[in-house]
Amino acid sequence: MATDLQIANSALIKCGGRTISSLTEAVKEARLCNTQFTSARQAVLRSYPSQFAINRVQLTINDAIPEYEYSNAFDLPEDFIRVVELNEGEEEYVLESGRILINASEVRLRYVWNYAGPEYPDPLWNEALSLYLAWDICYALTQSGELRDRLWQDYEKALKLTRWVNAKEGARQAVSAERFLEARRNRASFPRDPMT
């Protein structure tokens, strides 16, 4: 498990910078890490739904009915980052203004939540986060576009490895022939992960 500080120091090392003893330390490295850490963490959480950051909830219907196209609205959870699965993938929906618009009368949602530590349990995900943070702060520390490009490539590789290991550890979800064919026809109810 790694803390915010350990991940920030890993990012600084990748940039060739000096490590810090606190994110609130009065040095440029700490200020950059402290400023960018939350947005970097959220970006990596959104990029790939790592198992440690997935939550399940049944949503309650919102009284505000959409003007057209969908018959119901459900408020997204406060800690929402990304949809993993909604109603076992059987419903067409759209996310708008912090709500799920859908024709179903109930919503069972698996989603990535805004996991904020204090420790992060997946070492591969931690490496991806430290690389993303390093990429994010690199130019401000080094003014090196070449290093920044290399850090992005390393981040993409780390994310692929994280995805691969997570896929091996999780239960396989069977896709029925009907669901697959429906997805092929409509391209709406079986979204493809853009990172694969």
Image (cartoon, helix red, strand yellow):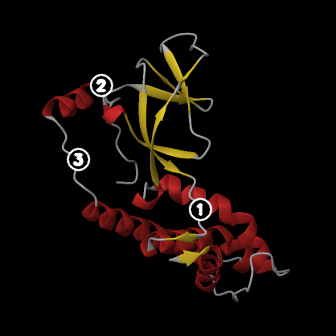
Depth-wise, is mark 2 or mark 1 nearer the camera? 1
- Kindly give the residue lying farthest to the top in the view shown: 68
Nearest to N terminus: mark 2 or mark 1: 1
Up-down relation of residue 191 to residue 136 (above or below): above
144 left or right, relative to 85: right
Up-down relation of residue 34 to residue 43 (above or below): below
Q: Which residue is mark 1?
A: 41
40 left or right, relative to 155: right
Describe the element under mark 2 as helix, strand or loop.
helix
Up-down relation of residue 58 to residue 49 (above or below): above
Query: How far across and how far down the image is residue 123, in percent?
Result: 45, 75
Amino acid at circle 3: Gln
Query: How far across and how far down the image is residue 22, in percent?
Result: 75, 81
What is the total number of numbered labels drawn onto the structure image?
A: 3
In three-dimensional space, the C-alpha distance between marks 3 and 2, rounded to whole angstroms, equals: 21 Å
Instruction: Give the residue at x 53% y 60%.
Output: 44
Amino acid at circle 1: Arg
Amino acid at circle 2: Asn
Q: Which residue is mark 3?
A: 173
Question: Residue 190 lies in what quarter of the image?
Answer: top left
Q: Which residue is mark 2?
A: 186
Instruction: Give the residue at x 75% y 79%.
Output: 29
Q: Nearer the viewer, residue 29 or 104?
A: 104
Nearest to N terminus: mark 3 or mark 2: 3
